[in-house]
Image (tube, rainbow, N blue to C red):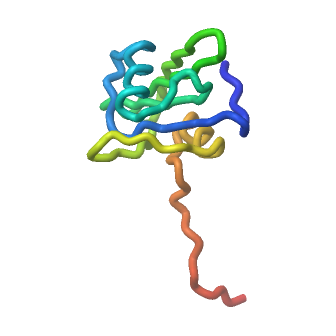
Amino acid sequence: MIRLTEEDSYYIVYGKTDLRKGIDTLAILLQHDFNHDPFDGAYYFFCGSRSDRFKILHWDGEGFQLIYKRLENGKVHWPRANQACLEPMSLMEVTRLLKGFPLKSSISVSSKKLFY
């Protein structure tokens, strides 16, 4: 089990990634396509074309961890984009993603006045 803290950095790769890729290929993808250092200790989240699974790449100081998560029921609400891009995430967004919830809450605050 991984321990996630506020001090860690988290990034999500929008779009589809080939989940057949392993540690080395995902690290090269981060370096060449996104100009990110995979050895920086951040957690990088990748999703493929199937919305019930994703991978997390993380350098822990001694080696890479490649975590593969598949939801037994439901789907991951993964943000899609026409072009792959890398965006930072908060710990709350990571927690929501790991539990299968959308990154952003779909409940909006109404601007209407309430009458009691």
Q: Quarter of the image holding residue 35?
A: top left
Q: Looking at the image, is 80 positioned above or below residue 1?
A: below
Q: Nearer the viewer, residue 21 or 39?
A: 39
Residue at the far top in the pictured view:
62
Q: Quadrant of the N terminus?
A: top right
Rendered residue at 40%/35% (across/down): 34
Q: Quadrant of the C terminus?
A: bottom right
Q: State the image coordinates of residue 110 (x, y, percent, origin top left).
A: 57, 77
Left or right, residue 75 beside residue 94: left
Q: Quarter of the image holding residue 40?
A: top right
Q: Nearer the viewer, residue 79 or 77?
A: 79
Q: Nearer the viewer, residue 43 or 50?
A: 43
Q: State the image coordinates of residue 51 (x, y, percent, origin top left).
A: 38, 34
Q: State the image coordinates of residue 106 (x, y, percent, origin top left).
A: 51, 59
Q: Nearer the viewer, residue 37 or 69?
A: 37
Q: Quarter of the image holding residue 13?
A: top left
Left or right, residue 41 beside residue 73: right
Rendered residue at 72%/34% (across/down): 5
Rendered residue at 39%/20% (across/down): 28
